[in-house]
Image (cartoon, rainbow, N blue to C red):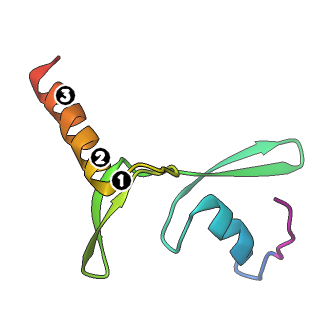
Amino acid sequence: MNGKATLDRAGRLVLPKPVREALRVDAGDSFDITTDGDRVILSPVRIRPGLQKERDIWVYRSGKPSNASIPDLIDETRRNRSRELTGG
């Protein structure tokens, strides 16, 4: 995806809405910043998968698109957590 943005006097850069939607980022999200010559590369810092409360509603955020059902995702998270806790 390509687009243009302008740096304001405070040094802020606003990502165009289509870019934010494509990257699935929102206000408050963090980015890793890398430079390569005169290029600036922004990479979203993905949160650890799990349930999060957003506007008083619990939301499952995996950080990646998925066709799995919510119960399947919850079961997978429980299995992974169980493995972490038992060391197996």
13 in relation to 42, above or below: below
> Horizontally, is 66 left or right of 54 in the view?
right
Q: Amino acid at mark 3?
A: Glu
Visible residue check, residue 84: yes
Local SS, label 3: helix
| Residue 69 tag number | 1
Label 3 belongs to which residue? Answer: 84
Q: Amino acid at mark 1?
A: Ser
Q: Amino acid at mark 2?
A: Asp
74 in relation to 86, above or below: below
Q: Nearer the viewer, residue 27 or 68?
A: 68
Callout 2 crowding tier (Cα within 10 Å): few <14, some 14–19, many ≥20? few
Look at the image and say whether residue 4 sits in the magenta stretch: yes
Cβ atoms at labels 1 and 2 below 8 Å apart: yes
What residue lies at 50% left-to-right and 64% top-to-bottom? 29
Local SS, label 1: loop
What residue lies at 19% left-to-right and 28% top-to-bottom? 84
Q: How much space separates mark 3 and mark 2, taking CA atoms?
A: 18 Å
Look at the image and say whether residue 51 sits in the magenta stretch: no
Q: Tell me which segment is drawn in magenta.
A: 1-6
Label 2 belongs to which residue? Answer: 72
1 in relation to 72, above or below: below
- Residue 74 picture location, percent across and down: 25, 49
| In the image, farthest residue toward the left | 86
| Magenta portion: prevailing SS class | loop
